[in-house]
Amino acid sequence: MKLTALWNKRQIPDIKVIPDWYVILGRIDASNYDVSYGNEDFFVVKTQAVKSHNSRFIVVGDIWLSNRFNLLQFLHLDKKYTDKEIVAYLWEAQGEECLSLLEGMFSLCVWDNQKRYLYLVRDGVGSRTLYYTNSGNICFIAPRLATLLPFHSRQLDLIALRDYLCCAFVPGEKTLWENVKELSTGMVLKMESSVELVNCINKRFFWSAREDIQNAEESLIWHGKQLRQLLDRVVQEYLPVDEAVGVYLSGGLDSSCITALAAKFHNHPVHTYSIHFGEKCPNELEFSGLVAQHCKTQHHILEITPDEMWGQLPLTMSYLDDPIGDPLTVPNYLLGKIARENASVILNGEGGDPCFGGPKNQPMLLNRLYGEVKNTEESLVTNYVNSFKKCSAYLPQLLKPDVLKEVKEQDFVFADYLYGEEKYLNRLMTINIKFKGADHILTKVNNMTSANNLSGRSPLFDRRVVEMAMQIPPQYKVAGAQEKAVLKQAVLDILPREIIHRPKSGMMVPVNYWFKNVFQRRAKSLLLNKNAEIAPYLNQDLIKQWLNYRGDAWRRYGVKLWLLTSLEIWLQVQKKERG
């Protein structure tokens, strides 16, 4: 029976995602695990580790280095060496300092056989993930949260639950599971093990996005030229060798500029992919088609029906580490399925908004300028959380009283970043890059592409692009009512004028219409069930009002209902996987 049919009969299907590799720090009985490398208190499971020349350092990880050829030259190695071996040899030569040389996407573990230290590392923008949890005197570390299911508590982290309801993702080090952490972006965490416990010796950021305004006296044209030179180099590094490449093309500025640059530099076919939700729903096919024609790509269009959206939701949630309540998650998964027919590498335009001042920053900027309360940390945090337009305003009614009591006085992870000396736009950009970028956008991209055996790459989230974005004066990012002015200037010569000057509309998934006219009965059965996984935490009477579209003349409950549906299904899938 098809997955869709089974799920439409109100049964969450049995979905088994093959566990990824993991490492163990601590004393264990190695015969209980599929160990590929081990010694007294460090073990690698389900993958092959590599050693440095002198065998002192052991490296395991998910590593893709965009500058691998430069690093091979630096190390005097030929191209047969893998990216993991490059890291092992660099670490042997320079220790932690070698991280400043790495460009690309990586999460990795480095074991020092001599000093008995374990280093956990995650790239600066968070293109890859790394999770860890302690069980007694043993620490388990993995790139996928689901891999750690057998080793951690079944208790939800209530603060993480609150954050998910407000943002549609879990920001920062917390995960939805209590006592399971996600390594922060750009961080090195140093650990050691003894018979009694696993101890974190220290942690530091080897890189982070921060304001560093330079050449403020130069013009928009000058900054656009510098950005273009960097984008040319980065996109060329991100293109695959000797094979076709795919690009997700919405028709907006960001994906269009990546498409144009890929078409300019790639000597093999460029496939572009766009989606829509039926003839009666608004779409951007006019603009994506215009760009595809302009760039002479092989263009593919996928129509996604509401039944496909609902039917594929359990499988999609199974590939996510924490839940993500973004309605585009399922389309990203389905788009990956068709993209894999033509390519193994897929580029996207993610990163343009957080790095260059997209339109979602404008309400916050206007509130800062004209709001009644402007400068208190509390008001900045409240306004930022409300800008997600999810469930933050409804928390007192949505959360059960005992849950609300636990979380209402707890700070949001954004607070320390919103109040500072940097320009306000750059503060917003820093938060968007560090949290929404790493914990929502890039995690979604990586998980949905890898689910289809694709390598997903986001050139606009490259660390060097982020650094340059933080160097560009704010007035060249948001210039009056014009957002992303410097990015538009950078690609002015390679895109049609209609793309440069059109306002951003975003890919609107018609969840409001679907929950009122297609999903309502299914969602009631799922969310209002007394045995629902969300029932101990959330007020189902309020959810019932939303499902009946009461209390809001604009009937905009669809986004909230999708967020809750995603959460419930994710929890059910996790429960089945745990067994």
Image (cartoon, rainbow, N blue to C red):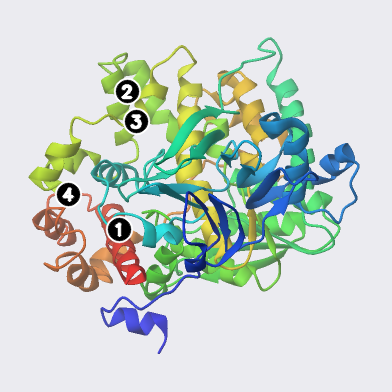
Asked if the residue at tag 2 contacts the one at tag 4, i.e. Cβ–Cβ closer than 8 Å, the answer is no
Identify the residue position indicated by label 1 in the image.
567
Identify the residue under disc 4: 552
What's the residue at 39%, 80% (across, down)?
A: 4
Task: Kindly indicate whether the residue at mark 3 contacts the one at mark 2 (C-beta within 8 angstroms).
Answer: yes
Label 4 – label 2 distance at C-alpha: 26 Å
Q: Where is 3 relative to 55, above or below?
A: below
Q: Are marks 1 and 4 in contact (CB under 8 Å)?
A: no
Q: Which is closer to the viewer, label 4 or label 2?
A: 2
- Sequence-first tag of 1 and 4: 4
Please determine whether, in this image, residue 8 is positioned above or below residue 210.
below
Dot 3, how many residues are within 10 Å of its Cα: few (below 14), some (14-19), or many (20+)? many
Q: Amino acid at mark 4?
A: Asp
Question: Is tag 4's residue or tag 3's residue first in the polypeptide sequence?
Answer: 3
Can residue 359 be seen?
no
Q: Secondary structure at mark 4?
A: loop
Q: CA distance from mark 1 to mark 4?
A: 23 Å
Binning the other alpha carbons within 10 Å of mark 2 as few (below 14), some (14 to 19) or many (20 upward) gives many
| Residue 462 in the figure: left or right of residue 549 | right
The tag earlier along the polypeptide, 1 or 3, is 3
Q: Residue at x 73, y 43 (%)?
A: 87
Distance of label 2 from label 3 (alpha carbons): 6 Å
Of discs 1 and 3, which sits in the foreground? 1
Q: Which residue is mark 2?
A: 380
- Disc number for residue 384: 3
Describe residue 301's horizontal placement relative to residue 294 as left or right: left
